[in-house]
Image (tube, grey):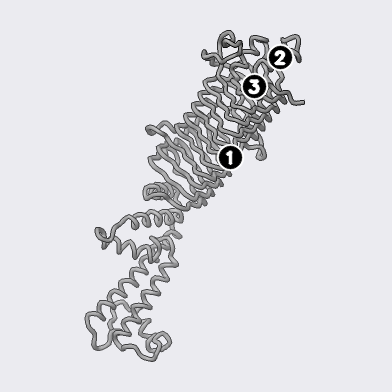
Amino acid sequence: MEVQFNNYDDVLAYLDKKDNSQRTKIIHLQKCKFSFSINLGTLFQILKDRNSDFNYLNFSDSIFQYPVKLCLINQKLVYDNKKNLIDSLFPKTKIDFELDFSACQFLDTVRFSGVEFCSDLSFIKAVFVKEVVFSGLVFKRYLRLIETSFRADVQFDHLELNDKSIFFSTIHDRTKFEGNSYFSNVVFMEAKFWDFVFTKDVFFQNTVFDCPAFFNNTKFLGKTVFSSVETIGLSEFKNKVYFDNAEINELVLERLIFEKVISFNYAIIKNISIDNVHCYGFPLSLVGTSIGNVKNEGTARFLKSEAMKSNDPFLVAELNAKEMTMHYNELKWRNNFFDKIIFLLNKISTNFGEKWQRGVLFIFLSWLLSFSLIITLRDGIGRTFIWFDNDYLKEAVGYIWQFGSLDVLGNTYGWVDIIVFIVGKILIAYGVYQTIAAFRKYGKK
């Protein structure tokens, strides 16, 4: 049967009625409804004054209807003029008893701040409906967030997480982040986030990973940011980092240091931006990685450099095409006319060396158009379709095959004929060169 509390005195009266000895090691407040804004620090002080020997406080399956905060006090209880219990302003830094909020429902905001947990803290299968803020916390024992649901924004700010911080135990009970997630100034000693789903944006800012970080098979459906807010060095990956088989909608890496391996093998990255990132260990592992939109030229250049270090010619060609495309788009016709022409031809012919098929098509079209124009200038427009006439076909083959032959111009020709002839030959030769260059990626391994 669910018990409803409207104030702290109701809690105390319930415990007095339930346990006359008041000396039990375990305090049970499970399956209760807290229908008032509660400061857990105040409640803990009430319970400690009542029974200083307890070491386990069980809130499992309870409902918190109003805001919950944890701000500890370190003095006798304080009452107002109407003899109502009020919060104290003097902080205490440590909790030396175990807290169990398993399967609890928090229907309003939750804020835990300035606390050191010397015993376990469990939120197994808990549901947070509104914003959650965990700030300035230190965990000496287990933090259990197994199958916990954060349905709104959650902030982890200035936390020290040890290697007993558990976000899951099997593939079926991951923590669910349905709002925006913020990890700021957090030190991770355990970071196993594989198979997670971050529904919205997630930010890791000024965060240090002292352990291997696993984001394998994770789905980042919003924007994912790993960055340092101030100067470089505040966000560090001191061990290996894995994003293998991850699905990432938008990835932003800014002002970071990777000291060892970082792997994106077989990951799908739809959008990516990289700025001021240093890899002091092995190059990025990008085997089978699918990269969609690259934000800027610098990002493409960085990724291309890492792909070259990994000896991946196919990805190098793909990233080079993205880099050159962005550089081409930045050029202005008025100030960079000839450079713009060269880049345009490069893009049209093989997409900057990425697609040899386009090179073959470019050669064919250059040959077809230039020869057709030469014959039209020489013989005029007749009733015979030149590409079905054997004599014309023979001349066409000679035009593309014999580079220096002028036979196709006939006995009389002018400057227009010569210009068309030379431009056609140049385009064909350029297409051949670009096609051969595009084939090089198949020979580099």
Q: Position of residue 288 (x, y in %)?
A: 52, 52
In the image shown, does 192 or 7 lie closer to the viewer?
A: 7
Q: Amino acid at mark 1?
A: Glu
Q: Is residue 153 above or below residue 385?
A: above
Q: Secondary structure at mark 2?
A: helix
Indicate which disc residue 178 carries.
1
Q: Position of residue 314 (x, y in %)?
A: 46, 56
**Badge 3: residue crowd in 10 Å (few <14, some 14–19, many ≥20):** many
- Front position among marks 2 and 1: 2
In the image shown, does 442 or 306 lie closer to the viewer?
A: 306
**Badge 2: residue crowd in 10 Å (few <14, some 14–19, many ≥20):** few
Residue at mark 2: 13
Determine contact: label 2, label 1, CB under 8 Å. no
Quadrant of the rendered image containing residue 108:
top right
Q: Residue at x 66, y 24 (%)?
A: 34
Q: Secondary structure at mark 3?
A: strand
Q: Residue at x 59, y 25 (%)?
A: 68
Q: Amino acid at mark 2?
A: Ala
Indicate which disc residue 99 carries.
3
Q: Compute the Cα span from label 2 to label 1.
A: 38 Å
